[in-house]
Image (cartoon, rainbow, N blue to C red):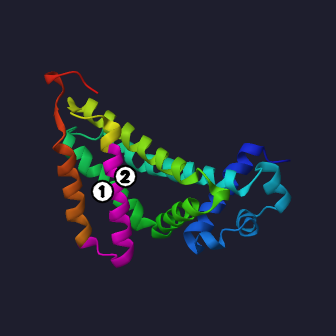
């Protein structure tokens, strides 16, 4: 029975992410991806019009994986904002440590997309999805703890994504877990500087 196109796309995106994480972006050719997925080149062209379209689905797959790692934390008790924020940044660090190749591959994708005309817009879409996820988590975390942000959550999300990029590269270079923990504390404290009880004014 023929595999539905959506299932085919999902399998190819997962295969692409596997190759990217294991072997790097340069090795993530169409042939390598279909071989990883156990499919033919014809199957790829049936599912995707281009490698660019596939890479966009890979970005979404990565973001959804990060969402799955962070979202359950919002239901933890006690629901205090410092605890939620610290748990959230720690969850990202756990994702990084569990699969360093994936995060390195995504950084490679960003840098290539900024130089390669054929990948125009990919880096912008990648970071728009990162910021949207963090914005969503910040809004939910504040709401569930009776707090609000004194500036737009979107602005804070951009700060968090920027911090996490630096944190990611630093850890990939030295793999120093002990040095990573204080950085997570610092990001948490920096965010808390912009939080206050929701009753004092209208929530963003």
**Residue at image coords 15%, 43%:** 193
Check disc 1 and report its element: helix, strand or loop.
Answer: helix
Asked if residue 119 lies left or right of residue 165, the reply is right
**Does residue 25 belong to the magenta stretch?**
no
Corner quadrant of residue 177:
bottom left
Asked if residue 65 lies left or right of residue 85, the reply is right
Q: Between tags 2 and 1, which lies in front?
A: 2
Asked if residue 34 lies left or right of residue 112, the reply is right
- Against 81, residue 34 (above or below) is below
Reading the chain from its start, which is encountered first: label 2 or label 1?
1
Q: Is residue 185 visible to us here? A: yes
**Residue at image coords 71%, 50%:** 9
- Against 47, residue 171 (above or below) is below
**Residue at image coords 27%, 30%:** 143
Asked if residue 49 lies left or right of residue 168, the reply is right
Corner quadrant of residue 16:
bottom right
Q: Position of residue 59 (x, y in %)?
A: 56, 52
For the C terminus, the quadrant is top left
Q: Decide whether the magenta segment is chiefly helix, strand or loop.
A: helix
Q: Which residue is mark 2?
A: 161
Q: Which residue is mark 1?
A: 90
**Residue at image coords 32%, 64%:** 167
Q: Position of residue 191 (x, y in %)?
A: 22, 46
Do the CB atoms of the residues marked 2 and 1 lie less than 8 Å apart?
Answer: no
Magenta highlight range: 157-178
Check disc 2 and report its element: helix, strand or loop.
Answer: helix
- The foreground one among 1 and 114 is 114
């Amino acid at each position: 029975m023929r595999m539905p196109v959506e299932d085919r796309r999902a399998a190819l995106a997962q295969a692409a992410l596997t190759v990217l994480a294991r072997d790097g972006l340069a090795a993530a050719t169409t042939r390598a991806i279909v071989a990883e997925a156990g499919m033919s080149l014809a199957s790829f062209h049936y599912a995707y019009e281009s490698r660019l379209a596939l890479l966009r689905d890979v970005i979404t797959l990565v973001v959804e994986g990060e969402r799955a790692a962070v979202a359950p934390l919002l239901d933890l008790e006690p629901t205090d904002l410092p605890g939620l924020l610290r748990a959230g940044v720690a969850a990202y660090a756990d994702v990084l440590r569990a699969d360093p190749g994936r995060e390195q591959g995504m950084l490679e994708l960003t840098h290539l997309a900024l130089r390669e005309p054929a990948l125009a817009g990919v880096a912008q879409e990648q970071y728009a999805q990162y910021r949207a996820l963090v914005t969503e988590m910040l809004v939910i975390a504040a709401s569930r703890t009776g707090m609000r942000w004194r500036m737009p959550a979107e602005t804070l999300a951009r700060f968090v994504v920027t911090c996490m990029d630096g944190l990611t590269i630093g850890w990939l270079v030295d793999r120093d877990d002990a040095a990573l923990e204080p950085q997570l504390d610092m990001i948490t404290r920096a965010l808390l500087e912009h939080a206050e009880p929701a009753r004092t004014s209208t929530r963003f």
